[in-house]
Image: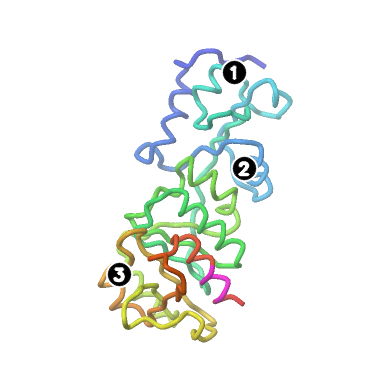
Amino acid sequence: MEMIKSKDNARIKNAKKLYKKKYRTSSYLIEGRHLYEEALKAGVSFKQIFVTEKFADLADAILVSDDVMNFLSDAETPQGIIAEVVMPTVATQDFSKLLILENVQDPGNVGTMIRTADAAGFSAVVLTDGSADSYSPKVLRTMQGAHFHLPVFQESDALAFYNRLKASGITVIATTLSDQSIDYRTLSTYDKFALIMGNEGAGILPETAQAADILAHINMPGQAESLNVAIAAGILMFSLTD
């Protein structure tokens, strides 16, 4: 197996571009043994796999030097394996439990919420245009492969999407601390619902509050002004699926 030793190799330079959203059209990079193994289990299609000598026995892999791996890697301590995988095509499905992230901007929060949605048995996660890039390295590391287990997709017209959900019989629940919201513990059990979590600082948009069927909040008996959005989402998701 011939080794790529130059950072200027065209294959390496083109792969590194995939960390930036504008260069991603049909594939993205995953890094590390765990994500690679999760992708294998999920039956994901690989376009190419870059490895150091540590994984040299991997079939169809492209061997690179440690220097090239360090250049290609986004991690502080590269594990020696980076794969380019094909983006999934999300088919129209009858999603019964949706998590919607409206302008959630922190990659760590986005990744944690997608991973928690997977753990709570949600059907899919939807991100509005203002949310963090779900294929960015930090989101991928935080998700730990959860995106291989449930669809994660983007909606450019959030309000129109909410209205389509309502028209299809899905109860839309939005989180807000407004006077019109109810304690989440009083929520009923819904066969089909969508839970909307808003921006870390601003919360949900005013038009989202108007479009929602139900507004809900988490009571906080302590002195903190707010909960981290990912923690709040976890509480609500498990409550709604209990």
Q: Which residue is mark 2?
A: 35
Q: CA distance from mark 3 to mark 2?
A: 34 Å
Q: Is 236 a magenta residue?
A: yes
Query: Which of the 4 image quadrants contains residue 194?
Result: bottom left
Q: Nearer the viewer, residue 129 or 107?
A: 107
Identify the residue at the far right of this view: 57
Q: State which tag comes first along the sequence, 1 or 2.
A: 2
| Amino acid on which the number 2 mark rests in the picture | Leu
Numbered label attached to residue 159: 3
Mark 3 lies on a secondary structure that is helix
Q: CA distance from mark 1 to mark 2?
A: 20 Å
Q: Nearer the viewer, residue 226 or 152?
A: 226
**Does the CB distance between marks 1 and 3 fall below 8 Å?**
no
Q: Which residue is mark 1?
A: 66
Question: For the point 59% across and 61% down, which residue is it?
Answer: 118
Q: Position of residue 183 (x, y in %)?
A: 45, 81
| Amino acid on which the number 1 mark rests in the picture | Asp
